[in-house]
Image (spheres, rainbow, N blue to C red):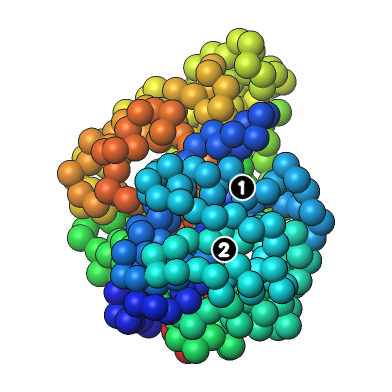
Amino acid sequence: MKGIVDLPLAGKRVLIRVDFNVPMDRNGNIAEDTRIRRGMESIRFAADSGARVIVASHLGRPRGQIVPGLSLKPAADHLAALLDRPVRMIGDSIGPDVKKAVEGLAAGDILMLENLRFYPEEQANDEDFARQLADLCDVYINNAFAVSHRKHASVHAICTFVKEKAAGHLLMDELRYFDSAMGAPARPLVAIVGGAKISSKLKALENLLHRVDKVLIGGAMANTFLKASGLFVGDSLVEDEMLQTAEAVMAEARKRGVRFYLPVDAVVTKEIAEDAVGMVVPVQEIPEGWKVADCGPATVRLYAAALANAKTVVWNGPMGVFEMEPFSGGTMGLARHVAACHGLTIVGGGDTDTAIHKAGVASAMGYISTGGGAFLKLLEGESLPAVDALAS
């Protein structure tokens, strides 16, 4: 698979698919710009190389309808400010007006298309829509890792019709760092897996057991493992239909000599709310009518000890309901210990990304992935359809 630096770009029309799906506040302003900052390196590189740059992205879930509040105009303005150069915005993604705007670009100019998902054809991987996007460019660059697990027109079908194609800086970085962690990692390799449900992480867990030395489990999914181990978990969220699966996962870990860690204490509450009252109990003493909302301080100390000799750490999923202050201690505490690791630390998933920024340790992480679903798909041992299409 070629990278953007491998192609001659001067004078060419270069379509760069980015992921500028950034959070917006009530007033339509960008609340957090990490994805724009991380994605703009390839835009700057192409413009500085004398290309005529066309930037394409989606924003939110307009479901094939034009939703003014999901226009990419704020992203275009923000990108222009970060690059310190003009970024022209056009009010469509395809059509004669877009073609005319592209024809009017000079070397180094940047044009941003309107939200691709205003067209239902984008998520339908429609070939005609993809062909119209391809007709806008001489070179296509996929720099949108976060949607590369999808078969969408602007990342998948388009690869059939473009003349030249390559990966952008961000996409190459994502794949390279993941390969460093899972392909030939420095050991011990420790995986931290959190979140609500085993069912959503099962494939990842099964794949990880073939690769890692230790697994640390957190979040509500830990409740299912605890119940499968014979413990009473009160009114906690549990996937009862996954109890046998949880037993099988733990048995496989024992068989492979993978050290499998579960919480030893928990923050429990009768109601998960911002003003709720919680208390810390050993996992063997969760009261009837109470529910687990976070792992406790002893668990954080245990997991810190498990991380002490780690040379590679991969983390996906929080330890509890960290968005609420009474239940943020486990995730925040673990984030600080991961940040203190001397090895390579790779964090993936939207909630985990939010958590490490909340903990103030983002700059101490080795790499923060921009993709939640795409990162999880790699953890499952699966390839990414858009990357496969780009490499074909």
Q: Which residue occupies 34% across, 37% down?
A: 362
Q: Which residue occupies 47% across, 76% down?
A: 13
Q: Is residue 341 above or below residue 94?
A: above
Work out whether mark 1 precedes mark 2 in sequence or the reverse, and give the earlier one.
2
Q: Residues within 10 Å of mark 2 (few under 14, many from 20)?
A: many
Q: Which residue occupies 59% across, 34% down?
A: 29
Residue 234 locus on image (x, y percent): 67, 27
Q: Amino acid at mark 1?
A: Lys
Q: Amino acid at mark 2?
A: Ala
Residue 280 locus on image (x, y percent): 50, 17
SS state under label 1: helix
In the rendered image, is residue 228 in sight?
no
Q: Marks 1 and 2, how far apart in space?
A: 12 Å
* Disc 1 target residue: 73
Question: In front: 289, or 277?
Answer: 277
In the rendered image, is residue 269 in sight?
yes
In the shown orientation, is residue 260 left or right of residue 113? left
Question: In front: 236, or 248?
Answer: 236
* Disc 2 target residue: 56
